[in-house]
Image (cartoon, coloured by chain):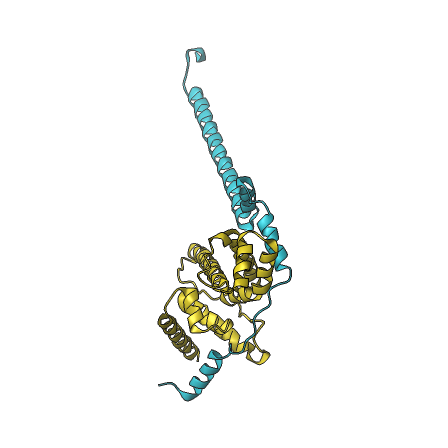
Chain colours: A cyan, B yellow
Amino acid sequence: MHNPKTYSSADEILHSLQGMQRATAPPFLYQRVMQKITSPTPNVWDRLAMLMARPTVALAFALLLLLLNATVTLLRNNTADTDNTAAANETEYYNATATLYDY
Amino acid sequence: MNAKEQAWITALQQGDENAFRRLVETTQDMVYNTVLSLVQQPADAEEITQDVYVQVYRSISTFRGEADIRTWLYRIATAKALDHLRRTKARKRKWWSSMLRYSEVDDAPAGLFYHPGVAMEQKEKAAQLFAMIQRLPEKQRVAFTLQQAEGLRTEAIAEIMRLSTGAVEALLFRARQKLREMIEKRK
């Protein structure tokens, strides 16, 4: 059972579109349609360019590049560290070992 | 279809630009209003309306004339509007689920939609109703929108949706029932 007060206000909302007029199409619609019809269909490169021009795609691509760059830099630093440690160990080993020439 | 209309359709099918211009100019408000009422975004509605006519231009040769050309236009317009809504919903869902791991997405656009054809004193109530219409199932939404925004009779809606009159009546009844429930829940 509907509450009469709620029922009437619900009806008011439900009937609020009665008597509405049609929205008018934007001007120059025909010209725009013809422009779309006559414009050449984009090829693969055009589509790729359009995709890359999207802000989200461009941002994602930039972030990916940054991440790649950071990874390469970190890897290089690690390799350099390992090389340095190996070289240091080597020097230490040779210093600590007596050779024939020490006598 | 009378002889004059038949000649017009034949001219359209032969690629007559004047016939096409006449088609656009005589039906553009009908198509735009239908699309706008469904997608509730003027910029999107304009784009979709253009796409409707591009499709009409490219596929007019397949029009067999079994239905009225307006019925055919309504079919293309509603199909394109629904496609757009599905794509928008899918995009929203992807965004939300990736960011928040949240799958339930509300179909309603961010803000209220004020249809330009609604009388000033009804604007607020109509905007509330439009927001609720977005939450109806697709078929109910199309049937209700065609009836309210375009003032179409049940028979015409049935022809557009390729359903029986009884099925459309049932859709309209369920749509009203759901909308009433939504209104009452808000109180």
Residue B1 at x, y percent in the picture: 49, 64
- Where is residue B20 drawn, in percent x and y? 58, 57
| Residue under the point 54% across and 70% down | B113
Residue A91 visible in the displayed image? yes
Q: Is residue A13 above or below residue B35?
A: below
| Furthest residue toward bottom | A4
Question: x, y percentage for residue B29?
Answer: 57, 66
Taking B1 as reference, is B18 above or below it?
above
Residue B39: x, y in percent?
50, 64
Residue B110 visible in the shown view: no
Furthest residue to the front? B3
**Which image quadrant for residue B116?**
bottom right
Name the residue nearer the viewer: B78 or B178.
B78
Compared across the picture, whether A78 is left or right of B17 comes to left
Quarter holding the C terminus of chain B? bottom left
Residue at point 39% right, 87% down?
A3
Residue situated in front as seen by the camera: B111 or B102:
B111
Question: Relative to the observer, which residue lies in front, B91 or A25?
Answer: A25
Q: Nearer the viewer, residue B76 or B185?
A: B76
Q: How many marks?
A: 0
